Image: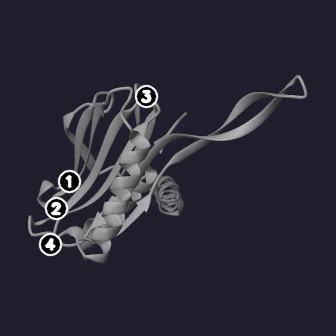
Amino acid sequence: MRFFKKIVTVILLQHSLLIYAAEITQPLQENKPVLYKNKAYRFSFLLPVDWKKQTGDVNSNNVLFMRLPLSQSCSFQFNITPMPTNFPTEMVVDAGLKTALVQVKQKKLFSAQRRDFVHDEKVLSKEKGKEVESIKPVTFVRGWEVMENRQETGLQRLVYQAYNKSNAYFNFIATASNENFTQCQPQLQQIMASIQFAP
Protein backbone atom coordinates (compact mmCIF):
# COMPACT_ATOMS: atom_id res chain seq x y z
CA MET A 1 0.00 0.00 0.00
CA ARG A 2 2.83 2.38 0.90
CA PHE A 3 4.56 1.50 -2.36
CA PHE A 4 1.38 2.32 -4.30
CA LYS A 5 1.06 5.69 -2.50
CA LYS A 6 4.68 6.52 -3.37
CA ILE A 7 4.07 5.73 -7.04
CA VAL A 8 0.94 7.92 -7.09
CA THR A 9 2.86 10.73 -5.36
CA VAL A 10 5.71 10.52 -7.87
CA ILE A 11 3.27 10.52 -10.80
CA LEU A 12 1.41 13.56 -9.42
CA LEU A 13 4.69 15.36 -8.80
CA GLN A 14 5.90 14.65 -12.34
CA HIS A 15 2.57 15.84 -13.73
CA SER A 16 2.80 19.10 -11.75
CA LEU A 17 6.36 19.68 -12.95
CA LEU A 18 5.31 19.14 -16.57
CA ILE A 19 2.47 21.68 -16.23
CA TYR A 20 4.85 24.19 -14.59
CA ALA A 21 7.47 23.65 -17.31
CA ALA A 22 4.85 24.16 -20.02
CA GLU A 23 3.70 27.40 -18.38
CA ILE A 24 7.17 28.92 -18.10
CA THR A 25 8.22 27.90 -21.61
CA GLN A 26 5.17 29.44 -23.32
CA PRO A 27 5.97 32.84 -24.88
CA LEU A 28 4.63 35.83 -23.00
CA GLN A 29 1.65 37.50 -24.68
CA GLU A 30 2.65 40.95 -25.86
CA ASN A 31 0.36 43.84 -25.07
CA LYS A 32 -0.74 44.45 -28.64
CA PRO A 33 -2.21 47.88 -29.34
CA VAL A 34 -5.94 48.21 -29.96
CA LEU A 35 -7.15 49.29 -33.41
CA TYR A 36 -9.95 51.88 -33.48
CA LYS A 37 -11.86 52.80 -36.64
CA ASN A 38 -14.11 55.74 -37.45
CA LYS A 39 -16.29 54.25 -40.18
CA ALA A 40 -18.06 57.48 -41.14
CA TYR A 41 -14.85 59.38 -41.95
CA ARG A 42 -12.77 56.31 -42.92
CA PHE A 43 -9.78 56.66 -40.62
CA SER A 44 -8.18 54.50 -37.95
CA PHE A 45 -5.57 54.69 -35.20
CA LEU A 46 -3.84 52.43 -32.68
CA LEU A 47 -3.78 52.88 -28.90
CA PRO A 48 -1.88 50.90 -26.25
CA VAL A 49 -4.07 48.60 -24.14
CA ASP A 50 -3.74 50.78 -21.04
CA TRP A 51 -5.43 53.75 -22.74
CA LYS A 52 -9.15 54.05 -21.98
CA LYS A 53 -11.92 56.17 -23.44
CA GLN A 54 -13.07 59.02 -21.21
CA THR A 55 -15.65 60.87 -23.31
CA GLY A 56 -17.17 60.81 -26.78
CA ASP A 57 -17.38 58.00 -29.30
CA VAL A 58 -14.84 56.77 -31.85
CA ASN A 59 -17.56 56.77 -34.55
CA SER A 60 -18.67 60.32 -33.76
CA ASN A 61 -17.03 63.72 -34.32
CA ASN A 62 -15.03 63.68 -31.09
CA VAL A 63 -13.51 61.36 -28.52
CA LEU A 64 -10.98 61.54 -25.69
CA PHE A 65 -8.69 58.73 -24.49
CA MET A 66 -6.30 58.85 -21.54
CA ARG A 67 -3.55 56.56 -20.34
CA LEU A 68 -4.08 54.83 -17.01
CA PRO A 69 -3.42 55.81 -14.30
CA LEU A 70 -4.96 59.19 -15.10
CA SER A 71 -2.34 60.92 -12.92
CA GLN A 72 0.13 60.42 -15.79
CA SER A 73 -1.98 62.95 -17.73
CA CYS A 74 -1.28 61.57 -21.21
CA SER A 75 -4.19 61.95 -23.60
CA PHE A 76 -5.27 61.56 -27.20
CA GLN A 77 -8.33 63.10 -28.80
CA PHE A 78 -9.82 64.12 -32.10
CA ASN A 79 -12.45 66.63 -33.18
CA ILE A 80 -14.05 66.74 -36.63
CA THR A 81 -15.75 69.81 -38.14
CA PRO A 82 -17.47 69.74 -41.56
CA MET A 83 -16.45 72.78 -43.62
CA PRO A 84 -18.23 74.44 -46.60
CA THR A 85 -17.70 72.70 -49.96
CA ASN A 86 -15.89 75.77 -51.32
CA PHE A 87 -13.46 75.94 -48.39
CA PRO A 88 -9.90 76.46 -49.78
CA THR A 89 -8.25 73.51 -48.06
CA GLU A 90 -5.00 73.48 -50.05
CA MET A 91 -4.42 77.18 -49.38
CA VAL A 92 -5.20 76.76 -45.67
CA VAL A 93 -2.86 73.77 -45.32
CA ASP A 94 -0.04 75.58 -47.12
CA ALA A 95 -0.51 78.66 -44.92
CA GLY A 96 -0.72 76.56 -41.75
CA LEU A 97 2.52 74.73 -42.53
CA LYS A 98 4.27 77.97 -43.50
CA THR A 99 3.29 79.54 -40.16
CA ALA A 100 4.38 76.40 -38.29
CA LEU A 101 7.83 76.42 -39.94
CA VAL A 102 8.29 80.04 -38.84
CA GLN A 103 7.33 79.00 -35.30
CA VAL A 104 9.95 76.22 -35.42
CA LYS A 105 12.59 78.90 -36.09
CA GLN A 106 11.16 80.95 -33.21
CA LYS A 107 11.46 77.85 -30.94
CA LYS A 108 7.70 77.87 -30.28
CA LEU A 109 7.45 74.52 -32.04
CA PHE A 110 9.94 71.66 -32.03
CA SER A 111 9.03 70.38 -35.50
CA ALA A 112 6.55 70.80 -38.35
CA GLN A 113 5.90 68.70 -41.44
CA ARG A 114 3.40 68.23 -44.25
CA ARG A 115 1.34 65.05 -43.91
CA ASP A 116 -0.91 63.96 -46.77
CA PHE A 117 -2.55 60.72 -47.84
CA VAL A 118 -2.39 59.76 -51.51
CA HIS A 119 -3.87 56.86 -53.46
CA ASP A 120 -3.68 55.74 -57.08
CA GLU A 121 -6.81 56.42 -59.10
CA LYS A 122 -7.76 55.24 -62.59
CA VAL A 123 -8.15 58.14 -65.02
CA LEU A 124 -9.57 58.01 -68.56
CA SER A 125 -8.15 60.38 -71.16
CA LYS A 126 -8.37 60.65 -74.94
CA GLU A 127 -5.28 60.14 -77.05
CA LYS A 128 -5.61 60.22 -80.85
CA GLY A 129 -9.37 59.78 -80.54
CA LYS A 130 -9.10 56.73 -78.28
CA GLU A 131 -9.83 56.47 -74.57
CA VAL A 132 -6.71 55.53 -72.63
CA GLU A 133 -6.76 54.42 -69.01
CA SER A 134 -3.90 55.53 -66.78
CA ILE A 135 -3.10 55.56 -63.08
CA LYS A 136 -2.77 58.93 -61.40
CA PRO A 137 -1.80 59.66 -57.76
CA VAL A 138 -4.59 61.62 -56.06
CA THR A 139 -4.33 63.42 -52.71
CA PHE A 140 -7.46 62.59 -50.74
CA VAL A 141 -6.35 63.93 -47.33
CA ARG A 142 -4.04 66.92 -46.91
CA GLY A 143 -2.66 68.32 -43.68
CA TRP A 144 0.29 69.17 -41.47
CA GLU A 145 1.65 67.92 -38.16
CA VAL A 146 3.54 69.79 -35.44
CA MET A 147 5.22 69.01 -32.13
CA GLU A 148 5.28 71.76 -29.56
CA ASN A 149 8.17 72.71 -27.33
CA ARG A 150 7.60 73.10 -23.58
CA GLN A 151 4.62 75.44 -23.16
CA GLU A 152 3.71 78.06 -20.54
CA THR A 153 0.27 76.43 -20.35
CA GLY A 154 1.91 73.41 -18.67
CA LEU A 155 1.03 71.10 -21.57
CA GLN A 156 2.98 69.90 -24.59
CA ARG A 157 1.19 68.57 -27.65
CA LEU A 158 1.53 66.82 -30.95
CA VAL A 159 -1.11 68.15 -33.33
CA TYR A 160 -2.16 66.80 -36.72
CA GLN A 161 -4.62 68.97 -38.66
CA ALA A 162 -6.06 67.67 -41.92
CA TYR A 163 -8.85 68.01 -44.47
CA ASN A 164 -10.39 65.25 -46.57
CA LYS A 165 -11.89 65.52 -50.07
CA SER A 166 -15.29 66.38 -48.57
CA ASN A 167 -13.70 69.31 -46.68
CA ALA A 168 -14.13 67.77 -43.24
CA TYR A 169 -11.56 69.29 -40.85
CA PHE A 170 -9.75 66.84 -38.54
CA ASN A 171 -7.89 67.95 -35.43
CA PHE A 172 -5.91 65.14 -33.74
CA ILE A 173 -4.17 66.08 -30.49
CA ALA A 174 -1.82 63.98 -28.33
CA THR A 175 -1.03 65.74 -25.07
CA ALA A 176 0.97 65.38 -21.86
CA SER A 177 1.93 67.73 -19.07
CA ASN A 178 5.36 69.35 -19.36
CA GLU A 179 6.58 67.14 -16.51
CA ASN A 180 5.34 63.90 -18.11
CA PHE A 181 5.94 64.70 -21.77
CA THR A 182 9.35 62.99 -21.99
CA GLN A 183 7.88 59.83 -20.47
CA CYS A 184 4.74 59.92 -22.64
CA GLN A 185 6.38 61.11 -25.86
CA PRO A 186 7.22 57.68 -27.40
CA GLN A 187 3.61 56.50 -27.05
CA LEU A 188 2.21 59.85 -28.20
CA GLN A 189 4.35 59.73 -31.35
CA GLN A 190 3.38 56.10 -32.04
CA ILE A 191 -0.31 56.99 -31.72
CA MET A 192 -0.01 59.96 -34.08
CA ALA A 193 2.01 57.93 -36.59
CA SER A 194 -0.63 55.19 -36.53
CA ILE A 195 -3.39 57.49 -37.87
CA GLN A 196 -4.37 56.20 -41.30
CA PHE A 197 -7.02 57.37 -43.76
CA ALA A 198 -8.61 55.09 -46.34
CA PRO A 199 -9.64 56.50 -49.74
Residue in the image at 35% along x and 54% along y:
95
Residue 146 falls in image quadrant: bottom left
The span from disc 4 to disc 3 (Cα, nearest Å) is 39 Å
The percent coordinates of residue 39 (x first, y second) are 42, 27
> Is 128 or 146 nearer to us in this picture?
128
Task: Name the amino acid type tagged 3.
Answer: Ser
Task: Name the amino acid type tagged 4.
Answer: Glu
Q: Are marks 2 and 1 in contact (CB under 8 Å)?
A: yes
Q: Which mark is residue 68?
A: 1
Task: Name the amino acid type tagged 2.
Answer: Gln
Q: In the rendered view, tell whether residue 90 sits above or below residue 121.
A: below
Which residue in the protein does label 4 denote? 179
Q: Which mark is residue 142?
A: none
Mark before the other along the chain sequence, 1 or 3: 1
Horizontal side of residue 89 vs 147, given as left or right: right
The percent coordinates of residue 97 (x first, y second) are 37, 58
Q: Residues within 10 Å of mark 2 (few under 14, many from 20)?
A: some
Q: Quadrant of the C terminus?
A: top right
Task: Name the amino acid type tagged 1.
Answer: Leu
Disc 4 secondary structure class: loop
